[in-house]
Amino acid sequence: MNRKLWLYVAVGILVGAAGVQGIHLIHDRTDDALFKQRLRCKALADKYVKDNTSSLNKVLINRVEFSRTRNSCIVATTEHFSAQPLEDAMVQKGLGTLGSSPAESTIIEIKDLLTGEELFTRTCTKFNECVLLGLQKQEDAFNDLH
């Protein structure tokens, strides 16, 4: 009787250990796939910035992620427009002196990089408006989509 009990315990331990290893294997594959999707999204976001930046506007990436719910890449950006070419110092500061000229504006948006669909857009001409309201609303919208 004792031998049977020890045999059942040993078999139970082996089955349990195999089950845990199987769960780890599935989890690792999922993490690897998500990492590859994020790399792909980052590459698409970099291409988006390169294609949409010129001497009159600067696109900054606030956040980029793979959305499992949409099965797509979403990017949160801030795009600063000016009637005059942007100076290097202004670009280094991000938004710079936004609102110092009536010809300047900023668009805060969230886009689906695969479909091009705009999921959130806010246009503003005052720096405080963008910082206090727009970026927080963008972050909230991004978290809802992610």
Image (spheres, helix red, strand yellow):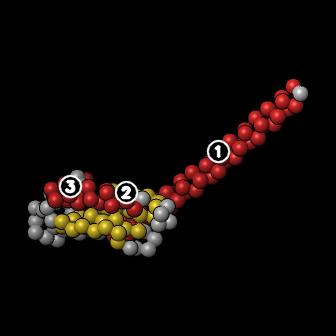
Q: Which kind of residue does numbered mark 2 sit on?
A: Asn
Q: Secondary structure at mark 2?
A: helix
Expressed as whole percent of the image width and height from the top left, the position of residue 17 reads 72, 38
The location of residue 78, given as percent across then percent down, is 28, 62
Residue appearing at x 82%, y 34% in the figure = 8
Label 1 crowding class (10 Å Cα cut-off): few <14, some 14-19, many 20+? Answer: few
| Residue in the image at 54% along x and 55% along y | 34
User: Residue, x 66% and y 46% (percent of image)?
Assistant: 23
Q: Residue at x 24, y 67 (%)?
A: 122
Residues tagged 3 and 1 counted as in contact (Cβ below 8 A) = no
Residue under label 3? 131
User: Closest to the observer: 67 or 8?
Assistant: 8
Q: Amino acid at mark 3?
A: Val
Residue identifier under label 2: 143
Sequence-first disc among 2 and 1: 1
Q: Give the vertical position of 97 relative to 11 (above or below).
A: below
Q: Is residue 72 left or right of residue 140?
A: right
Residue 24 marker? 1
Residue 59: x %, y % from top left:
30, 63
